[in-house]
Amino acid sequence: MIIKIIELVFAFFSKMYIFFYKERGEYWRIFPVIIMSTIVMINLQLIMSFLFSPGKYFILGLATFWLFIFHTLIKKREYNWVVQYPISRKQKVIIVLVLIIDVLVVAVLSVVSRNIYIATH
């Protein structure tokens, strides 16, 4: 189930990249992996900031870990697979809504985290 969601989001971001840049280089594969790992890392960083203060090398290692995981899960997918992957309008709307809600929640929790930091220092 998780793999299917990751593939759907990967196909969504890949199709977005391919729409603007129609070249068949390997960049179409790198763009969604970086975007997906960035989204995961921002969410994890925010959650971890409420629990403990992680070091910069821990965060760097965790970011590298997520890049490796997403790259490993997606590396067998080819350009034609992305082009032919069916994404309905409903799925696109759900992905965009989840991303918007995620950005809003991260923004609110970031303000709360900042206020806690200011109040304690």
Image (cartoon, rainbow, N blue to C red):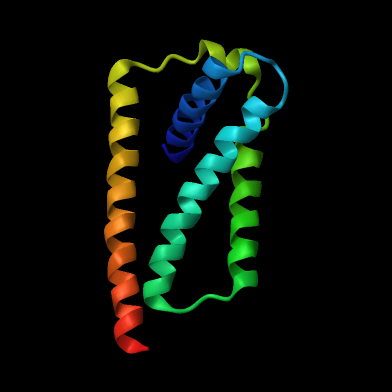
- Image quadrant assignment for residue 89: top left
Q: How many marks?
A: 0
The residue shown at (50%, 30%) is 7
| Left or right of 121, for residue 101 | left
Q: Position of residue 22 (x, y in %)?
A: 62, 13
Q: Is residue 12 left or right of residue 18?
A: left
In the rendered image, the quadrant that contains the N terminus is top left
Residue at x 41%, y 56% (from the top left corner) = 43
The residue lying at 29 percent from left, 26 percent from top is 93
Query: Residue 39: horizontal and vertical position, in percent?
Result: 46, 48
- Residue sitting nearer the eye, 6 or 2: 6
Q: Is residue 61 above or below residue 36?
A: below
Residue at point 60%, 57% (across, down): 63
On-image quarter of the C terminus: bottom left
* Closest to the observer, 112 or 94: 112
**Please, is residue 46 above or below residue 18 in the view?**
below
Image quadrant assignment for residue 49: bottom left
Which residue, as the protein is rendered here, is positioned at the far right?
Answer: 25
Left or right of residue 120, residue 61 in this image: right
User: Dividing the picture into quarters, in which one does residue 86 lie?
Assistant: top left
Query: Where residue 51 sits: x, y (%)?
Result: 39, 76
